[in-house]
């Protein structure tokens, strides 16, 4: 009866957990699951889990991504380049973030650049953030800059954020044309003549006197939020479903059936997937495992309301009760699933935070 029932991620995990799987079946299950998770291959094993960037850990604990529709978060720091020497001052710097490891199917949904405060500054300043669309060539051409954000800086505590989404979107589409971001900090005085800030309120670059350790926490941080192909497809499907469900409710079509209790009726059952058991604890940084649940049980005739049957399942169950040889009963499958968050290593050993949809069964039903 359950043989024909389809399932996705949870089934692949269940298959991996089954101890009796032979090597080739196990490899096939792992391949399928990696594809579902959007990974080309298993990240290389590591002896020790890598340090998780603080910003990612905070996001993981908060269980929500700040950018709408995003299901993935990565953090980046400036990659030092020989060009850095052309920007000796503290008020103007080119930041380069190497986002080349982001898979091609991901679309940028948010990009927040955050700066730490410098101590002991006064007065009014303004931070300007530009996308370097085309770098200048000495003695030949001026650079082409596009203003991304303009942030007023007042003396005070706390992190300063600027929006770099316009640039991040472009970098993911045309990786060859990532020429970095230009940051400028200007004085804002009454005469409204903008001068370079001598003592910027925020730290845009490393000073020669900065210790490595000190700079690590003070340097600008880019949080990039993306949505991958699978998440986009499933969001669009669920938006369509919500629309058609509302339409169906308006039409008031709802079949009614009597309740009848049975012992092995379709319901959600416990299943804990331990990533150590499937040999993945070396690249899944957190969680160690999770409650996936599964659906199992009979879909009896007449189909009770609480079994979340579709009109089609009701009809199929009816036909089966009349003539069991023609069609099987409806299947007990997940009807509502929820997502979980995972911190994992990508192929170049960066820690990535992703929300994976449809990983945990919330409700079962007959379909
Ligand atoms: C960006 O990182 C990739 C590996 O992650 C490396 O191959 C590439 O050279 C880097 N690009 C720059 C401009 O640093
Ligand atoms: C039917 O769906 C609802 C909501 O998703 C859920 O609470 C309920 O447990 C489901 N029924 C069964 C039998 O799982």
Image: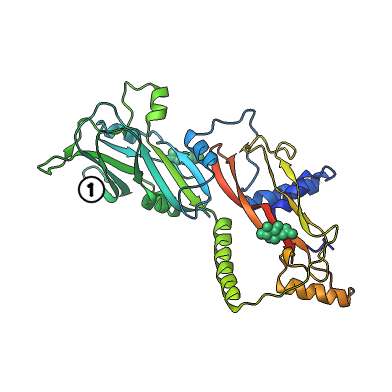
| Left or right: 242 in relation to 25 | left
Q: Residues within 10 Å of mark 1 (few under 14, many from 20)?
A: few
Task: Please report the residue visible at 45 percent of the width from the left and 53 percent of the height from the top.
Answer: 109
Tell me the residue that label 1 is attached to.
142
Residue 94 is at least partly visible in this image: yes
Q: Nearer the viewer, residue 137 or 323?
A: 323
Where residue 341 appears, as percent x and y from the top left, is 59, 45
- Ligand 2: which quarter? bottom right
Q: Nearer the viewer, residue 209 or 260?
A: 260
| Quadrant in the picture for the N terminus | bottom right
Secondary structure of residue under mark 1: loop
Q: Is residue 344 left or right of residue 365?
A: left
Residue in view at x 81 percent, y 65 percent: 299
Give the colouring mode of the picture: rainbow
Which quadrant would residue 349 be assigned to in this image? top right
The residue closer to the viewer here, 365 or 279, is 365
Q: Is residue 6 visible?
A: no
| Depth check, front residue: 233 or 178 | 233
> Is 137 positioned to the left or the right of 13 in the image?
left
Q: Position of residue 33 (x, y in %)?
A: 69, 50
Q: How many marks?
A: 1
Which image quarter is the C terminus in? bottom right
């Amino acid at each position: 009866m359950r043989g024909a029932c389809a399932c996705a991620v949870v089934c692949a995990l269940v298959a991996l957990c089954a101890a009796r799987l032979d090597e080739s079946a196990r490899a096939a299950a792992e391949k399928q699951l990696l594809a579902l998770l959007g990974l080309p291959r298993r990240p290389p094993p590591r002896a020790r889990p890598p340090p998780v960037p603080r910003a990612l850990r905070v996001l993981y604990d908060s269980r929500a991504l700040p950018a709408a529709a995003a299901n993935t978060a990565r953090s980046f720091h400036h990659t030092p380049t020989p060009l850095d020497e052309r920007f000796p001052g503290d008020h103007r710097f080119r930041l380069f973030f190497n986002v080349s490891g982001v898979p091609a199917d991901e679309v940028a949904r948010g990009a927040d650049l955050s700066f730490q405060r410098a101590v002991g500054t006064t007065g009014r300043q303004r931070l300007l953030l530009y996308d370097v669309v085309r770098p200048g060539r000495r003695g030949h051409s001026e650079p082409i800059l596009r203003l991304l954000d303009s942030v007023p800086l007042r003396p005070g505590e706390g992190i300063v954020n600027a929006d770099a989404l316009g640039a991040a979107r472009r970098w993911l589409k045309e990786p060859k044309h990532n020429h970095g971001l230009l940051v400028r900090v200007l004085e804002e005085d009454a005469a409204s003549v903008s001068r370079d800030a001598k003592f910027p309120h925020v730290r845009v670059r490393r000073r020669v006197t900065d210790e490595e350790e000190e700079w690590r926490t003070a340097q600008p941080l880019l949080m990039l939020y993306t949505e991958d192909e699978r998440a986009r497809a499933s969001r669009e499907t669920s938006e369509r479903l919500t629309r058609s469900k509302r339409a169906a409710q308006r039409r008031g079509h709802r079949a009614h059936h009597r309740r009848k209790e049975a012992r092995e009726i379709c319901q959600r059952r416990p299943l804990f997937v331990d990533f150590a058991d499937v040999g993945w604890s070396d690249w899944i940084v957190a969680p160690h495992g999770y409650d996936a649940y599964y659906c199992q049980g009979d879909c009896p005739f007449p189909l009770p309301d609480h079994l979340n049957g579709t009109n089609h399942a009701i009809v199929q169950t009816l036909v089966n009760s009349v003539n069991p040889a023609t069609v099987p009963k409806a299947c007990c499958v997940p009807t509502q699933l929820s997502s979980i968050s995972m911190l994992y290593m990508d192929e170049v050993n960066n820690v990535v935070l992703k929300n994976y949809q449809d990983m945990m069964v919330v409700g079962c039903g007959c379909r």
